[in-house]
Amino acid sequence: MSGIALTIPYLDTDADQLSFTLGHPAREALAVRDLTVGGLDVQLRLLGASHQVFAGPVRETVACLPGFQGGLPDTAAQDFGNWAYHFSATVRHFAAAEFGRQVAQIRGRSDEHPQALYGIFPGSPEAVTALTVESQSSGLTWHTWHTYPQSGQIVSTHTRLEAR
């Protein structure tokens, strides 16, 4: 899937502004992709302030949210009935040339992935939010990337949702 050229600028301008929540209601989305993966309904949502993934019982939000303090946890885990949820996040800083190479890899991976959604924000082809999801033997995994050209930061998240 090729990237969507978004017309609204992104609202989060630094990784430190992102917060993590579970169960947050749907926010206004710039783009949505509905999928069925591994027998579960999944909705990938691009926000002007990052992303939401709704998968089975999970409503994951990583975004700049009013009233929530910024800063992502390194890891988080929660049980949802018969499902075990595991989240991890990393923030990496890159020099300009390496940042561009990393963003090109994210875009290429997303272009080739059959279950992806990514948007390119106005002002820079390196301002990207990308999401991919895939089935695993006992559930799902999804990855997200949030790129910040002005600071050379890339936030990547990895989530596993496993049946117990």
Image: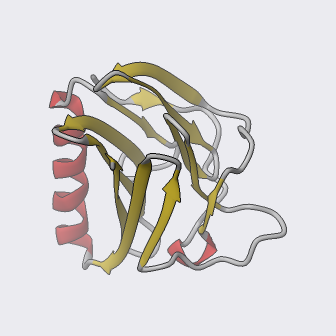
Q: Residue at x 71, y 38 (%)?
A: 26
Q: Position of residue 91 (x, y in %)?
A: 37, 76
Q: Residue at x 55, y 27 (%)?
A: 31
Q: Is residue 122 visible?
A: yes
Q: Residue furthest right?
A: 67
| Closest to the observer, 86 or 108 | 86
Q: Residue at x 23, y 41 (%)?
A: 138
Q: Position of residue 139 (x, y in %)?
A: 28, 40
Taking the image as shown, residue 127 lies to the left or right of residue 8, namely left
Taking the image as shown, residue 35 lies to the left or right of residue 109, namely right
Q: Position of residue 111 (x, y in %)?
A: 21, 30
| Closest to the observer, 16 or 114 | 114
Q: Position of residue 106 (x, y in %)?
A: 23, 49
Q: Quadrant of residue 157?
A: bottom left
Q: Quadrant of residue 39?
A: top left
Position above or below: 88 against 43? below
Q: Residue at x 44, y 46 (%)?
A: 82
